[in-house]
Image: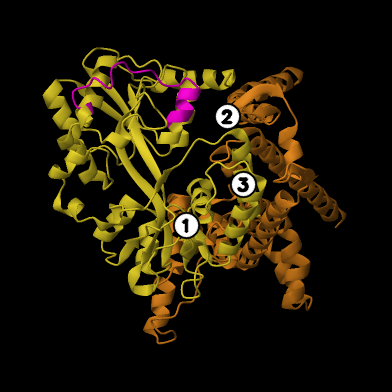
Amino acid sequence: MKGKLLKILVSISFLFFGTSVFAAGKLNLYNWADYTPEDLIEKFEKETGISVTVDTYDSNETLLAKLQAGGGSTGYDLAVPSQHFVEIMIKEGLIEKVDGIKDMSNYKYVAEQFQGPSFDPNQDYSTPWQMGSASWAYRADSYSGNGSSMMEFFRPSDEVCGKVAVFKSPEEVVNMAHLALGSNFCSEDPNEMQAVMDLLIEQKKCVAVYSSEGINERLMSGEVIMHAHWDGYSQVGKWEGVDDLTYAYPKEGVVGWFDSLVMPKGAKNVEEAKAFMNFVMHPENMAMLSNFAAYANAIPESSKYLSDDMKNATNIQVPDGIPVKFGQACNKESQALIDKVWTKLMQ
Amino acid sequence: MNIQGENKTQNRIYSLLPLWIVVGIFMIGPLLVMAVVSLMESNVYGGVHFKFSLSGYRQILFDTNLFDEIEFNPAYLIIIGRSFMLALVATFISLLIGFPAAYFISRQSNRVKNILIFLVTIPFWTNLLIRTFAWIIILGKGGVIESSFNFFGLLDEESSLNLMYTNSAILIGLVYSYLPLMVLPIYASMEKMDLRLLEAATDLYSNRIELIRKIILPLSMPGIIGGSILVFVPCLGAFIAPDLLGGGKKLLLGSLIQFQFSYARNWPFGAAMAMFLLALVILVLIFNARLNRKHREYASQK
């Protein structure tokens, strides 16, 4: 189905770089960069005697491409995709079914609303890692609004016009526009997408930059006052000295993401991988993850073990009544519409 | 004699073999993969279906709108035109700065010359991405330029010059990145220039402007053409400077292609676009070859 040529090319490159070790007592984890706390790995190694190797990637797309091209020979036992990519990977047959997740001893700690999530309803493939949201953040000292409506971001007041920044890729931005307009994610309705496009084009008059990098630096220098942002990352910015950096939880909701542990096709160290999945679900260990990356998790009891910094992290606490709508894997038709909207916006 | 001659040809073939292997594996191979991908059907989750399709190329000019009607779509032509304009302007500015600089360097003593040429190449020691990031610090709010304006009281603390995220910022980034590629070839051709020609011209009462127009300019023409090509071609596909300094508000060819391979997961269209860019570059090179030939004819007539 996939490009055979590509597979061959990648297999050749794996001849050179593949260091997969198939012996028992090993675990190869493939995770986002800056997302795996060292002390957590040490604790796991001490408790189980399994030695862990960690490789990193920078985006869901990179992970997907590698799994597609690797064809069951990537050598990784676990990876950490976001919810909609779990869906894609199940569809494309890129990850293994894992037996008995529900019977794992620490599964009971998972909050009820996250047991059997929509992307994996029977909990056949995944266990929770971290979760967060995408919305926008602002410098409260320089902005008189209160972040209560998504429209504050898409139709900026004169006060902040020209000092607004937006993510570089359409994924979250289009979803945020859907939230603002009350339409559905992955819409295939041309009229709805036309409305999304009109809103984005209107917003562009006030946009200084489209970028997903150096967000906190840009806010810190005052170059922009309002920036599309992630909750945990904005909290890190606050810790790093932008005291008035406030993450907006608009009444229309925020775009949620939920990263999970999954087992790529052809994983060799199945038992070790399961042990790690179970280990991470323990509240104490999950708290270590959150303390490190500043994101929330699906294990309520982990709050006992959170650092004081994390307990007072106002930017990641979702206020009551604010919906969190998770991004989905769009089909070809709606994906094509999103591409058109974005190209038109940037032409 | 004859045998020697044959050996020479043979030697030439054998000694060029490594070059052909390197060019074949690292240049022609990937180009072929690209050409093949550009003729396939796209798969929604990245990669391609192995089915022949011209849709990648068709999409450059025609597109279905949101309501699925086929219509002429100027969006990509606008992007191509914009990239062209930006590359042309950047090349012209580089020439304006590079030509006098090269002339100045070529007229120095050997020692000074070597030092100056060395200084011109120093920027290449650092990665382009990092050098472009440095421009953010220079141009940005509260950056080097603004704070020195503040220091001399030319600008109050509250206001900003708004240098970043503009077309001028992109141009500054491009000219800065590729200026050495303009200076070096011009310098090389000026270096070879016979200074006695200049003396003779001055003896014959030519003024400075005539000196430049009738002697220096024609003699350094190969360098100017070479330098312009070296600056124009990378500027056409640049995406680091437009993204970081221009704020990514308008797509250029480079960022458009990158977008197709990453987020949009439309590999065939991205590949078709890349082939199109390649065709443009080849056209420019053909144009250049013609210019060069004209120049040689002109030179031999003299």
Residue in the image at 42% along x and 16% along y: A73
A96 in the magenta segment: yes
Cα distance between the residues tagged 2 and 1: 27 Å
Residue B188 visible within the image: no
Q: Few, some or many C-alpha atoms within 10 Å of disc 2 (few <14, some 14-19, many ≥20)?
A: few
Residue in the image at 30% along x and 27% along y: A29
Quadrant placement of the C terminus of chain A: bottom right
The answer to which of B162 and A210 lies nearer the viewer is A210
Outermost residue to the right: B301
Place of residue B265 in the rendered image (x, y in percent of width and height, measured from the top left): 57, 36
Residue type, mark 3 in image: Leu
SS category of the residue bearing label 1: helix
Instruction: Look at the image and give the colour of chain B.
Output: orange
Q: Mark 2 or mark 1, which has the lower sequence index? A: 2
Q: Are marks 3 and 2 on the same chain?
A: yes
Q: Mark 3 or mark 2, which has the lower sequence index? A: 2
Place of residue B176 in the rendered image (x, y in percent of width and height, measured from the top left): 53, 61
The answer to which of B269 and A204 lies nearer the viewer is A204
SS category of the residue bearing label 3: helix
Q: Compared with residue A146, is residue B9 higher up or lower down, i.e. above or below?
A: above
Query: Which residue corresponds to mark 1?
Result: B132
The answer to which of A44 and B248 lies nearer the viewer is A44
SS category of the residue bearing label 2: helix
Query: Which residue corresponds to mark 2?
Result: B26
Q: Magenta stretch: give its range.
A: A86-107
A148 in the magenta segment: no
Cα distance between the residues tagged 3 and 2: 23 Å
Query: Which residue corresponds to mark 3?
Result: B256
Q: Few, some or many C-alpha atoms within 10 Å of disc 3 (few <14, some 14-19, many ≥20)?
A: many
